[in-house]
């Protein structure tokens, strides 16, 4: 709020977009892309865990899902100049 009060144009634009459509979660999430990515991965894990409960061997299924989630959540390696 202090940054908005100081007149930060980026934050003012974000607040204006939110006020225009306050119930659009995608518009709000676009202002915080890393938090959005984490929320998507976590929702994926929760959904797969719920599906695993219906399976005959849920622990191995959950282990596979968590391994896949780790791969999805890995940070890309920074690129080196000149490569």
Image (cartoon, rainbow, N blue to C red):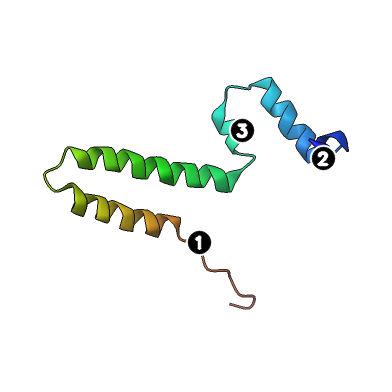
* Identity of the residue drawn at 14% across and 48% down: 57
The reply to whether discs 2 and 3 touch (Cβ–Cβ < 8 Å) is no
Say which residue label 2 marks: 3
Residue 53: which quarter of the image? Answer: top left
User: If you read the primary sequence from the N terminus, does the residue marked by circle 3 or circle 1 appear first?
Assistant: 3
User: If you read the primary sequence from the N terminus, does the residue marked by circle 2 or circle 1 appear first?
Assistant: 2
Task: Judge the density around disc 2: few (<14), some (14-19), many (≥20) Cα neighbours within 10 Å.
Answer: few
User: If you read the primary sequence from the N terminus, does the residue marked by circle 2 or circle 3 appear first?
Assistant: 2
Q: With 14 as the anchor, is 49 left or right in this view?
A: left
* Identity of the residue drawn at 50% across and 46% down: 37
* Identity of the residue drawn at 55% across and 29% down: 25
Say which residue label 1 marks: 75
Task: Judge the density around disc 1: few (<14), some (14-19), many (≥20) Cα neighbours within 10 Å.
Answer: few
Q: Position of residue 52 (x, y in %)?
A: 22, 42
Separation of residues labelled 2 and 3 (CA atoms): 18 Å
Say which residue label 3 marks: 28
Closer to viewer: mark 2 or mark 3: 2
* Identity of the residue drawn at 20% across and 51% down: 59
Considering every residue shown, the one lying at the far left of the view is 56
Q: Secondary structure at mark 3?
A: helix
Task: Judge the density around disc 3: few (<14), some (14-19), many (≥20) Cα neighbours within 10 Å.
Answer: some
Q: Position of residue 32 (x, y in %)?
A: 62, 43
Q: Position of residue 4 (x, y in %)?
A: 82, 35
The reply to whether discs 2 and 1 touch (Cβ–Cβ < 8 Å) is no
The N terminus lies in which quarter of the figure? top right
Q: With 19 as the anchor, is 74 left or right in this view?
A: left
Q: Position of residue 9 (x, y in %)?
A: 82, 38
Q: Secondary structure at mark 2?
A: helix
Q: With 19 as the anchor, is 40 left or right in this view?
A: left
Considering every residue shown, the one lying at the far right of the view is 6
Separation of residues labelled 3 and 1 (CA atoms): 23 Å
Q: Which mark is residue 64?
A: none
């Amino acid at each position: 709020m202090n940054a908005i009060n100081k007149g930060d144009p980026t934050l003012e634009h974000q607040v204006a977009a939110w006020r225009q459509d306050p119930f659009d979660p995608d518009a709000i999430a676009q202002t915080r892309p890393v938090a959005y990515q984490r929320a998507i991965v976590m929702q994926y894990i929760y959904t797969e865990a719920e599906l695993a409960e219906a399976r005959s061997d849920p622990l191995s299924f959950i282990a596979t899902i968590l391994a896949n989630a780790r791969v999805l959540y890995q940070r890309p390696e920074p690129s080196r100049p000149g490569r």
